[in-house]
Image (spheres, rainbow, N blue to C red):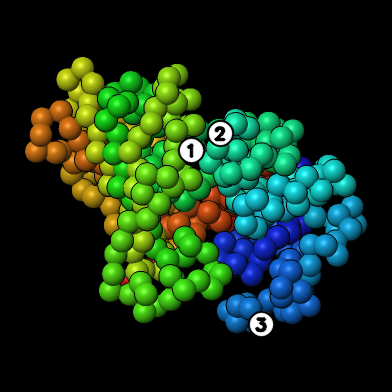
Amino acid sequence: MADRATIGILGASGYTGSELLRLLLRHPRVDVGLLTADRRAGQAMRDVFPQFSPYALPRLVSIDDLDWPSTGVDLVFCALPHGTTQIVIENLLTKAPAIKVVDLSADFRLFDSDAYARWYGHAHRAEALQREAVYGLVEVYREAIKGARLVANPGCYTTCGQLPLLPLIRAKAIDLDEIVIDAKSGMTGAGRAAKEAMLFSEVSEGFHAYGVGHHRHMAELDQEFSKAAGREVVPTFTPHLVPMNRGILSTIYVRGTEGRGPEELYAILVDAYADEPFVHVLPFGEMPQTRHVRGSNMTFIGVAKDRVPGRAIIGAALDNLVKGASGQAVQNMNLMLGFPEAMGLEQVALFP
């Protein structure tokens, strides 16, 4: 791979698009050569996000105006809404098959076409690419990602649920029929589009569950947990909306198998993540806080005893815009382009 790469961001006017740009501007081996935002086409990035005023950046353009072979990009991040993304990526890779893609939507996360249709209400429109895509949870699929042309970046909730649970599932250390994930997310997880339910006066000083019993991230959890276990796993998962900008906190309840207690589950997680740059297991008994990972690509995991023997309480925290989206996407990009995995992602959390 070349010493440098030219990168494009499709959907640069959203939260994940702007977060990608924030991270890439500090990356020593990439140049941002393409930014799209259909409704903002012709504008400068500083007109959408004034924090980018000091930087020389390409103007925003419409995807429909692009001639992909002449764009000169090596890799694009696709930060577009699910449903439309699969058509955009199929068109891109048909016209310029050498370009690599990291997709931040949900369009290529499910490898089963029937499951996709069941959860999203329509047949997948690019099934060949759906079969080609590699699921982008780096800590699990690192080697496959290195050789991939299309990577499906995981969801924010699912990343915060999978990282603490997959090592325990693979070790057969927990009861697969007693997994409860209680997750809370900040407002940016809902995107930047104007919505009445997201107005300040609608969400401030409140806290509520949503998508109860039918949130689409359940399909992703089912898929990856079942694959790790070698049998069907259907966890209980409930997301909540918290009036803060960034962060996800998952509180997870599990029961150990064959007499395993919380200390043994903790030891499995410590061993699993001893060499991982972006997953940190706290001392036993400590619980993570979203404020301690804000703006970073880190996931903090904690394990504590429940008062019921044999049960453990596991906490996980990450920034939904970084490790839950754009930071993990840059991690995937680094692997796909042959760069050091942590390059451009070493920033410490912003606190307070």
Name the mark on residue 70. none
Name the mark on residue 115. 2
On the rendered image, what quadrant is the N terminus found in?
A: top right
Mark 3 crowd level (few <14, some 14–19, many ≥20, 10 Å Cα): few
Q: Position of residue 105 (x, y in %)?
A: 60, 51
Secondary structure at numbered mark 3: helix
Please indicate whether residue 112 sits to the left or right of residue 148 in the image. Answer: left
Q: Residue at x 89, y 58 (%)?
A: 67
Q: Residue at x 60, y 77 (%)?
A: 49
Q: Amino acid at mark 3?
A: Asp
When the figure is inspected, residue 49 is found, relative to residue 247, above or below; the finding is below
Q: Mark 2 near mark 1, Cβ–Cβ under 8 Å?
A: yes
The residue that disc 3 covers is 47
Please indicate whether residue 114 sits to the left or right of residue 293 in the image. Answer: right
Q: Position of residue 106 (x, y in %)?
A: 58, 47
When the figure is inspected, residue 191 is found, relative to residue 121, above or below; the finding is below
Q: Mark 2 near mark 3, Cβ–Cβ under 8 Å?
A: no
Mark 2 crowd level (few <14, some 14–19, many ≥20, 10 Å Cα): some
Between circles 2 and 3, the one closer to the viewer is 2
Q: Residue at x 43, y 70 (%)?
A: 197
Q: Is residue 100 visible?
A: yes
Disc 2 to disc 1, C-alpha distance? 8 Å
Q: Position of residue 345 (x, y in %)?
A: 53, 55
The residue that disc 1 covers is 219
When the figure is inspected, residue 297 is found, relative to residue 175, above or below; the finding is below
Which comes before the other along the chain, label 2 or label 1? 2
